[in-house]
Amino acid sequence: MDTAPAVRQETPSGDAVTALESAVDGPVLLPGTDAFAAECAGFNLLVVHRPAVVVGATGPQDVQAAVRFAVQHGLPVAVVCTGHQPFEPVQGAVLITTSRMDAVEIDVPARTARTGAGAVWQQVVDAAAPAGLAPLNGSSAKVGVTGYVLGGGLSPTLGRTYGWAADHVRAIEIVTADGELRRVTATAEPELFWAVRGAKGNFGVVTAMEIDLFPVSTYFGGGLFYAGEHTEAVLRAYREWITTAPDELSSSVALLRLPPSPEVPAPLRGRLAVHVRVCFLGPAVEGERLVAPLRALAPTIIDTVMPTPYRAFASVHQDPVDPVPLRMRNALLTGLTDEVVDALVAFGGPGSGCGLTVLEVRHLGAALARPAAVPSAVDARDAGVSVWGAAIGPAEATAPAIAQLDRLITRLRPWSTGRRYLNFMSGADGAECAYTAQTYQRLRTVKRAYDPGNVFRLNNHNIPPA
């Protein structure tokens, strides 16, 4: 098993922390205060960080100072923007928070956005919308742009039309383990540029990115919700439906078991429901024709599919907006076969005893299967669908459901590509799960060049240096 190299670790002295405070503009916080706990908190309530010191970065110079401080004292570096993914908690490290670095600038003629390390997707969508442009965003308005893109960036609304978000990055500004701020592109340090786009924070702290925007201002889409008794019928119809889906149609289907809470729509409270998510970029009349077979297969209890401004993209998936305790797992499959549908129905259908909050099948292919113009480390282009599950609740309550999900993923192994999608992986998954052996070895070589001491080994899926 690969392990991090041994490093000299020491507890920073009071004088050292005072010197760090004088070197940065943002707050420098130590354990034991309410401000420290609030600064460390993220969206996923199961992840409680306990670093040695936290730096609330306001710009690249703060990040550089924090990285140099960490290296001087033999401490690893971790980064948190929104904290959605269930990584292992950070212990005894220098934690850099980037929420203050949230500037977004739109270049309309170039169709690009410059995003600070702390920007979230709704900010970028809102800034680009007046120009009739949109980014390759995720399903949630509150997910951080940087971590999402570095993990590959599988857009559930635009992905099949335009591809992986990591493939559409023009430039990255990153602080590496030597404390240097680098601007990397396809021609400036191309190996680092390749590696960062698809391997998260293994190579440094990204302070800003320049990403492509696309001519999208509206979509035809939303959600079709069915009662749980129609699980098998919907899944089988969906399997057939996606076989002729045009590239302009991105979609997924999810089995939901939502709590009987007031914030949940009344028809969905405390019951199994099936949710088909649709985003079509063509004319509404064509969208109506495409969706008609799904509407006809069973009565819907909620139907929100309609022409919609792109600013409302988050209404397609309706992800939680408030922090939750969350665990998840995923698998990438070559396709959605009858046997896979059988397994999903048996696992998550009525009377199955499934304990997951959500079990999703997302259609891939189209632009997501094509090679990038500027190659990146994303290694999921041969997948036809992803299967992703999540359980929301306290750790002890969700453990049985995640164990069930692990057994399902094992059952689906005959149809697996052998890899997983990085942004849907849990903290316990090893990074090699996301890559071919060749890609993984190349990433380890890049790691050796830019972070030989494995300083950036926490709150990512760590890739040790070769």
Image: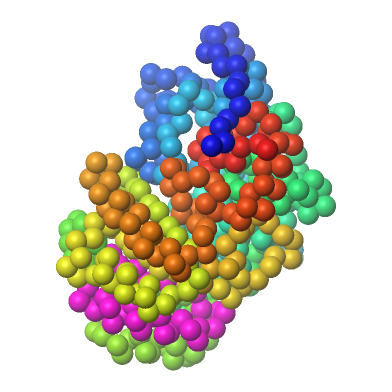
- Residue 18 visible? The answer is no
In the displayed structure, 50 sits above or below 140; it is above
- Residue 281 visible? The answer is yes
**Residue 60 forms part of the magenta stretch:** no
In the image as oriented, which residue stretches furthest toward the right? 187
Whether residue 226 sits left or right of residue 113 in the image: it is left
Determine the residue positioned at 27% across, 66% down. Answer: 348
- The residue range painted magenta reads 227-256
- Residue 297, located in which quarter of the rendered image? bottom left
Determine the residue positioned at 54% across, 26% down. Answer: 94
Q: Nearer the viewer, residue 442 or 321?
A: 442
Determine the residue positioned at 74% across, 61% down. Answer: 374
Expressed as whole percent of the image width and height from the top left, the position of residue 276 reads 36, 74
In the displayed structure, 205 sits above or below 160; it is above
In the displayed structure, 273 sits above or below 24; it is below
Expressed as whole percent of the image width and height from the top left, the position of residue 364 reads 52, 71
In the displayed structure, 345 sits above or below 80; it is below
**Residue 232 forms part of the magenta stretch:** yes
Report the quarter where the N terminus lies: top right
Q: Nearer the viewer, residue 310 or 399?
A: 399
- Residue 410, located in which quarter of the rendered image? bottom left
Whether residue 423 sits left or right of residue 273 in the image: it is right
